[in-house]
C-alpha cells in the first residue's frame, strides 16, 4: 500500500482509518452499556432514543433521611451530577456511589413539607431536607442516623394505558455499617 501512495496520502489514509475505528469503538461501547448496564438509550443520541420510553426522566430516586427526631425526604436537586449519572446508568456501583455521596453531605432542614404517594397509594407528608446552598435551608445541621434510597423507573404500557414501576435497586446507609446496596 505504501508504494502506491505518497507519504502525505498515506498519512491521510491512516488518519481516516483511525477516525473510523474510533467512531466504531464509541458506537460499540454505547451498545454494550445499553445492553449490559441499563444505560438509557437516550444518552448518546441515535435512533434508539425514539424507540423507547426509558429516558433518564422516567427514573426516580427517593431518598429518606432519618434523624432521632423525625424523617425527612431529601431534596434530590441537591445531589446534582451523581444523581444524574445514576439516572443515566442505574448500576449497583452508581447507586453505591450515590449512597456514599448522600451520606457525606451535611443535610439541613429546609422548612418545607412535601406530600408523597407511597407504594400502597396512601399519602404522607414529610419535611424536606436540603444542603447548605439551598435558599430555604436553616443553619442547624441534621443528625442523620439512617439514609434509605429507593430507585425505580416508570413505564407506560401503551395498549392498556397503565403505568408500571420497575425497581432499579435500593441502598441503605447507617453510621455503623456504611452503605449497602440491594439490587
Image (cartoon, helix red, strand yellow):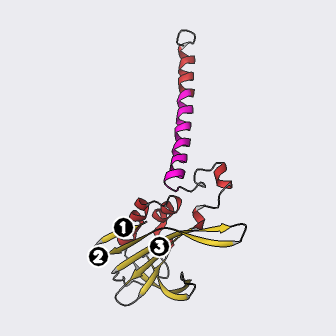
Q: Residues within 10 Å of mark 3 (few under 14, many from 20)?
A: some
Residue under numbered circle 2: 175
Of residue 55 and residue 135, the one placed in the foreground of this image is 55
Rendered position, 107 above or below 22: below
Label 1 sits on a secondary structure element that is helix
Q: Residue at x 48, y 77 (%)?
A: 134
As drawn, the label of residue 69 is none
Q: Is residue 42 visible?
A: yes
Q: Position of residue 139 (x, y in %)?
A: 39, 83
Label 3 sits on a secondary structure element that is strand
Q: Quadrant of the N terminus?
A: top right
Quadrant housing residue 147: bottom left
As drawn, the label of residue 150 is 3
Closer to the N terminus: mark 2 or mark 1? 1
Q: Residues within 10 Å of mark 2 (few under 14, many from 20)?
A: few
Residue under numbered circle 1: 100
Q: Is residue 107 left or right of residue 14?
A: left
Amino acid at each position: 500500500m505504501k508504494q502506491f501512495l505518497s507519504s502525505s496520502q498515506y498519512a491521510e489514509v491512516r488518519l481516516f482509518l483511525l477516525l473510523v475505528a474510533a467512531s466504531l469503538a464509541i458506537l460499540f461501547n454505547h451498545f454494550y452499556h445499553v445492553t449490559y448496564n441499563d444505560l438509557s438509550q437516550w444518552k448518546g443520541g441515535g435512533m434508539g432514543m425514539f424507540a423507547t420510553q426509558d429516558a433518564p426522566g422516567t427514573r426516580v430516586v427517593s431518598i429518606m433521611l432519618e434523624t432521632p427526631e423525625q424523617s425527612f425526604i431529601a431534596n434530590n436537586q441537591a445531589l446534582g451530577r451523581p444523581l444524574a449519572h445514576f439516572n443515566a446508568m442505574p448500576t449497583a456501583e452508581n447507586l453505591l456511589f450515590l449512597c456514599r455521596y448522600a451520606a457525606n453531605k451535611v443535610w439541613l432542614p429546609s422548612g418545607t413539607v412535601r406530600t408523597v404517594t407511597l407504594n400502597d397509594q396512601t399519602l404522607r407528608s414529610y419535611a424536606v431536607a436540603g444542603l447548605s446552598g439551598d435558599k430555604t435551608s436553616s443553619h442547624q445541621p441534621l443528625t442523620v442516623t439512617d439514609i434509605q434510597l429507593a430507585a425505580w423507573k416508570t413505564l407506560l404500557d401503551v395498549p392498556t394505558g397503565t403505568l408500571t414501576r420497575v425497581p432499579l435497586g435500593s441502598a441503605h446507609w447507617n453510621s455503623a455499617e456504611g452503605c449497602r446496596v440491594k439490587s
